Image (cartoon, rainbow, N blue to C red):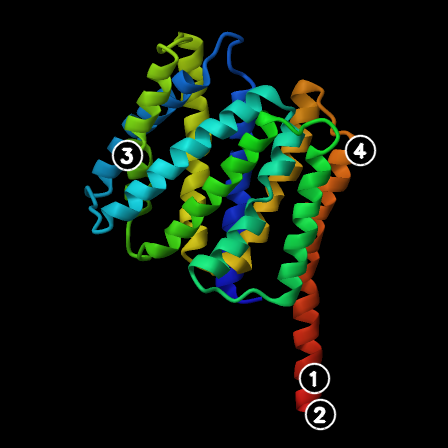
Amino acid sequence: MQRAVLAGLLLLLVGNVFSALYDVSVKWLPEDANAGSFLLLRQLTSGLMLLPLWWLAGRPQTQHLPIHLWRASVGVVGALFLILGLMALPLATVSSLFYSAPLIIMLLGWWLLGERVSAGQWLCAILGFGGILLILAPTQIGWSGLMVLGAAVTFSVCQLLLRKLPATESPVVTILLYNLLGLPIALIFAAFNNFAGFSWALLGVALASNLFLMAYHWFCVLAYRRARAADIAIGEYSGLLFIVALGWWWFDEWPGEHVWWGAALVVLPSLISPLIAHLWQAISDVEVIR
């Protein structure tokens, strides 16, 4: 495995630990919490927390403001969808659906960036989306499940837009602008619900989730700049294991049989495909030597 691909996968693995903790933190919201108010608090406090880091980093600038604006606008909509899904569905169900994102990243990378997708990766995509239907079909075919899928699509778009940024651009700028430029849309969401549910408890959860989410975004920025999206997207699946464990440990949530089978269809083909491709390449190299 190439060093850049290995580095990207390791960075995603660490990042998904924080992603799992972020998902868990949404479950800590007060019963009267409003998703729009929580999102606004999270965006605002995240920007304030990042400003000192940006200052210490020498106040780096960007020459790619339109890309950042697109990322922030798409990302804040997806963030609201994911929060609503987490508030309504078990952690394992949300995660199994959201981890269709690596498949979406792979397909969008082929469509938008012209990245090569092998026959094996196409097969993984077909099986993965079959797994999504299996997860949704029995009990979760509703707005909550569809919102989680919408969040997965927006997440995938945000990750691919990172490929449009130069490797020399500071991750602090990328994450700071992601939060600040998304504030107007977050404000609209909160105002639509009359800014309901604001409390100190909501602020505390927002601060905790910010720390987890900022760490996750930081590692994603580093990972997707080091390798092609199609090569490392499978690393996103690692968080599913953390989510299942934390959901069972803290909230006594254990996935149903259909979720296990669906998650297997989503995850396993993409995990096995690179190994088969590597083995096939090794066999081909041996034949060439002979």
* Depicted 270 relative to depicted 286: above or below: above
* Residue 185: image location, x then y, percent: 32, 28
Sequence-earlier tag: 2 or 3 = 3
Q: Are marks 3 and 1 in contact (CB under 8 Å)?
A: no
Residue at x-position 56% and y-position 20%: 87
Task: Read off the residue under disc 1.
Answer: 286
Closer to us: 256 or 139 = 139
Q: Quadrant of residue 288?
A: bottom right
Residue type for callout 4:
Glu
Sequence-earlier tag: 4 or 2 = 4
Q: Calculate the distance from the C-alpha at mark 3 to the C-alpha at mark 4.
A: 41 Å
Residue type for callout 2:
Arg
Task: Read off the residue under disc 2.
Answer: 290
Sequence-earlier tag: 3 or 4 = 3
Task: Read off the residue under disc 3.
Answer: 181
* Depicted 270 relative to depicted 132: above or below: below
Residue at x-position 33% and y-position 46%: 171
Q: Are marks 3 and 4 in contact (CB under 8 Å)?
A: no
* Residue 17: image location, x then y, percent: 55, 37
Residue at x-position 40% and y-position 37%: 75
Image quadrant holding the C terminus, namely bottom right
Task: Read off the residue under disc 4.
Answer: 257
Q: Are marks 1 and 2 in contact (CB under 8 Å)?
A: yes
Q: Is residue 198 left or right of residue 127?
A: left
Element marked by disc 4: helix
Q: Calculate the distance from the C-alpha at mark 3 to the C-alpha at mark 1.
A: 53 Å
Closer to us: 211 or 181 = 181
Q: Quadrant of residue 165?
A: bottom left
Q: Are marks 4 and 1 in contact (CB under 8 Å)?
A: no
Is residue 172 among the parts visible in the rendering?
Answer: no
Q: Can you tell which of label 3 and label 1 is closer to the viewer?
A: 3
